[in-house]
Image (tube, helix red, strand yellow):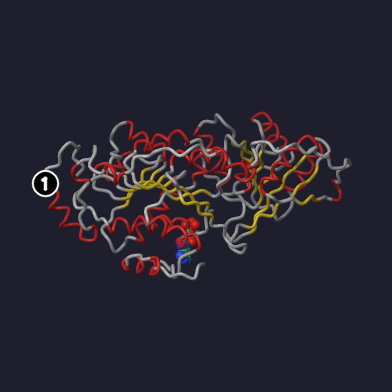
């Protein structure tokens, strides 16, 4: 927590009151860093893991903006928030509604997994904030049923996860549709990795970089260690031993290929270690069924490939086990993020054979942590740890990331082009806090060059 107050952040009393009602007495670190910059109109690029208060960090400047520049005419969404999963979208919309409860600002959600009729209000009625997952929103954009011309601010929440889930093209296209925006904010658990940096460089205009490294006490506690394995048999013995420990209540085991997944799942089954598995190219129904069995605890082991775990919201677990080491360090970080629910301790265990050592070294460099080696007495490795010859620094090193940032693009800003290509109603914004009167007045006026949104 910072020593600031919400009043010092110059938030409207109507918002501060709502925050008090939600039990938010003071801004968190990320909130006190992001809010003033965002309110000054700057683009934001923030590393802020879940649990730091990042949602309100972007919602509050948005809400303040909507109060400062209330709409005077009906019209489509002015704020678009993109998130990787439906659950998250709903959560963010709920928070927004609570913060805005004393105002007439309207919040809608657009996600997959629900009938299109549920999105009618978001598509046809005056809406201020839309929280969406990329897939379904893009569908509406393609069908021209979602009007993105009035978007003034775009937020990308959990950008790293959206990339991991393969949404990069969708998000790029949505951002291009929202080209009249004047501000973009990107939030991500980490700001590492070439993909993310490039993505950020393309979408943000001279962003303020904010890193809300939570204090140690607030950080997710993930216990990480390594068991060295002599060979595949030894590795399997280590795995079964681990899975039988009483504290291993719910685990995800990551493997590198589909074939290895099927083999491991059935061997575990033979050992009486019942499991569900997820692999790429699985029918949607089977996926849901497998995940469902795991979610409700019918089985407490899930075997998965990284491909398979993309695009779904895996429940959090007590243990993540890397049966195969991931090829890259950021996948490692992503995998282990499945454990350690806020406040609770999580454990990530990697089983490492000699040929995996270079991958382990890569992870240790990236996370700047040496993972403890542990030994199980009855399963002691016979071989010594393989030494990895140190290589010269290559460009993949995260320290080089600044240099990798492509040059900044010129971007057209809304404030320079305000009237261009926009429907008339977009310029005039009524007082959002006194919606009914304003809306009625506006409804009587003629709206030109735009499909009628009400
Ligand atoms: P988030 O990182 O946005 O998922 O927020 C994590 C949790 O902290 C949520 O349960 C929020 O409701 C809560 N929270 C956010 N901001 C504050 C605050 N300023 N004071 C107290 N709780 C907060």
Q: Residues within 10 Å of mark 1 (few under 14, many from 20)?
A: few
Which x, y percent locates residue 244?
74, 49
Q: Seen in the image, is 385 located left or right of residue 442?
A: right
Along the horizontal axis of the image, is 267 left or right of 229?
left
Q: Residue at x 51, y 48 (%)?
A: 188
Kindly indicate the quadrant of the structure image that contains residue 64: bottom left
Of residues 197 and 225, which is closer to you in this image? 197
Residue in the picture at 61% in, 60% down: 344
Q: Nearer the viewer, residue 227 or 434?
A: 434
The location of residue 409, given as percent across then percent down, is 43, 37
Nearer-the-camera pick, 276 or 236: 236
Residue 280 lies, with reference to residue 53, above or below; the image says: above
Does residue 434 sit above or below 179 in this rendering?
A: below
Query: Residue 31 location, x and y as percent?
Result: 46, 61
What's the residue at 43%, 70% (across, down)? 5
Q: Which residue is mark 1?
A: 445
Is 342 or 202 nearer to us in this picture?
202
């Amino acid at each position: 927590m910072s020593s600031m107050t919400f009043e010092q952040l110059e938030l409207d009393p109507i918002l501060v009151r709502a925050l008090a009602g939600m039990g938010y007495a003071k801004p968190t670190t990320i909130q006190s860093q992001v809010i003033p910059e965002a309110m000054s109109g700057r683009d934001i690029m923030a590393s802020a893991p879940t649990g730091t208060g990042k949602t309100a960090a972007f919602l509050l400047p948005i809400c303040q903006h909507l109060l400062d520049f209330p709409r005077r005419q009906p019209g489509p969404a002015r704020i678009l928030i993109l998130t990787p999963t439906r659950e998250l979208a709903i959560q963010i919309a709920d928070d927004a509604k609570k913060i805005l409860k004393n105002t007439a600002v309207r919040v809608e959600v657009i996600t997959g997994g629900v009938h299109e009729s549920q999105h009618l209000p978001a598509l046809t009625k005056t809406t201020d904030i839309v929280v969406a997952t990329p897939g379904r929103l893009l569908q509406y954009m393609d069908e021209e049923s979602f009007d993105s011309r009035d978007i003034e601010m775009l937020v990308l929440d959990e950008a790293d996860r959206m990339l991991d889930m393969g949404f990069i093209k969708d998000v790029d296209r949505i951002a291009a549709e929202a080209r009249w925006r004047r501000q973009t904010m990107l939030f991500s658990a980490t700001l590492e990795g070439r993909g993310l940096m490039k993505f950020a460089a393309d979408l943000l205009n001279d962003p303020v970089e904010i890193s809300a490294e939570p204090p140690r006490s607030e950080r997710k506690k993930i216990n990480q260690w390594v068991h060295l394995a002599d060979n595949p048999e030894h590795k399997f013995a280590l795995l079964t031993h681990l899975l039988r420990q009483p504290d291993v209540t719910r685990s995800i085991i990551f493997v590198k290929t589909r074939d290895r997944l099927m083999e491991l799942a059935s061997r575990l089954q033979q050992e009486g270690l019942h499991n569900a598995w997820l692999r790429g190219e699985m029918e949607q129904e089977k996926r849901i069924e497998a995940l469902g069995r795991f979610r409700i605890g019918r089985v407490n082991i899930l075997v998965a490939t990284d491909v398979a775990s993309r695009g779904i919201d895996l429940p959090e677990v007590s243990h993540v086990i890397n049966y195969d080491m991931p090829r890259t360090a950021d996948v490692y970080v992503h995998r282990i993020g499945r454990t350690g629910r806020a406040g609770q301790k999580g454990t990530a265990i990697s089983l490492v054979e000699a040929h995996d050592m270079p991958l382990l070294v890569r992870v240790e460099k990236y996370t700047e942590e040496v993972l403890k080696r542990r030994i199980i007495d009855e399963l002691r490795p016979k071989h010594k740890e393989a030494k990895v010859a140190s290589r010269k620094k290559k460009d993949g090193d995260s320290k080089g990331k600044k240099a990798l940032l492509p040059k900044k693009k010129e971007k057209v800003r809304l404030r320079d082009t305000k009237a261009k290509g926009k429907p008339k109603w977009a310029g005039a914004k009524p007082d959002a806090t006194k919606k009914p009167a304003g809306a009625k007045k506006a409804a009587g006026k003629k709206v030109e060059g735009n499909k009628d949104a009400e």
